Amino acid sequence: MANDTSSIVVACDGSDQSLHAAKMAANLAKATGQSLKLLTVFPGSKVERLVISGVWPTELEEEAKDYGRKVFDAVKEAVSGIAEPTDEVLLKGEPAHEIIEYLQANPGTHLVLGRRGHSTVRSLTLGSISEKVVRHANGPVTVVSE
């Protein structure tokens, strides 16, 4: 049987939930022999706050790179000894939209991401980003719960 996916991409934001998803994605990559890619989105809402507070556009790029570096370093530490990531993808904008666009531009991608729940009631449902991605993804998506 042919393998329908070319790589496993884990969407992370550095939260405990996303690090748990990264470990699951690393184990999946190891078991299937596929490459593991890391993806994070520097949120547009953070960009807006920085602009309002007077940060210059040149500084925004550095802020985004710093955000990405912190997230990617945390993920690499979490998956250390399981699988070595082959690529790091830093996007900027509204997370669900950017992830969906990435999936559309990269067919054959199996996305893994964490589920979010901040209260007792909300913990029974998917988080807004994971829900949007699941609804609009054009390929396999695994949502990992703790």
Image (cartoon, rainbow, N blue to C red):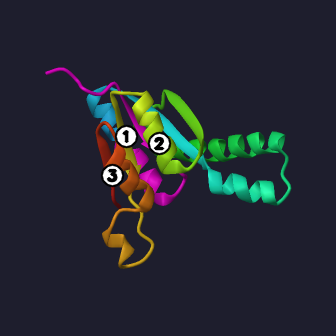
Helix or strand or loop: what does disc 2 sit on?
helix
Q: Secondary structure at mark 1?
A: strand
Q: Position of residue 30 (x, y in %)?
A: 33, 32
- Of discs 3 and 2, which sits in the foreground? 2
Q: Upstream in the sequence, badge 3 or badge 2?
A: 2
Closer to the camera in the image, 88 or 93: 93
Task: Write down the residue under mark 1.
Answer: 111
Q: Residue furthest top?
A: 2
In the rendered image, which residue does mark 2 sit on?
Answer: 99
Residue lying at the far left in this picture: please name it.
1
- Along the horizontal axis of the image, is 49 left or right of 76? right
Per the rendering, the mark at residue 143 is: 3
Counting from the top left corner in percent of width and height, residue 82 is at 40, 37
Q: CA distance from mark 1 to mark 3?
A: 8 Å
Looking at the picture, which amino acid does disc 1 mark? Leu
Disc with the residue nearer the chain's start (1 vs 3): 1
Q: Is 49 above or below relative to 62?
A: below
- The spot of residue 15 in percent (x, y) is 52, 57
Query: Does any portion of residue 67 appear in the rendered image?
Result: yes
Q: Residues within 10 Å of mark 3 (few under 14, many from 20)?
A: some
Q: Residue at x 56, y 47 (%)?
A: 74
Give the magenta-colored segment's residue range.
1-25
| Residue sitting nearer the eye, 55 or 64 | 55
Q: Position of residue 21 (x, y in %)?
A: 39, 50
Q: Is residue 106 above or below residue 11?
A: above
Q: Residue at x 24, y 26 (%)?
A: 4
Q: What is the three-letter code of the residue carrying label 3?
A: Val
Contact between marks 2 and 1 (CB within 8 A): the answer is: yes
Q: Quadrant of the C terminus?
A: bottom left
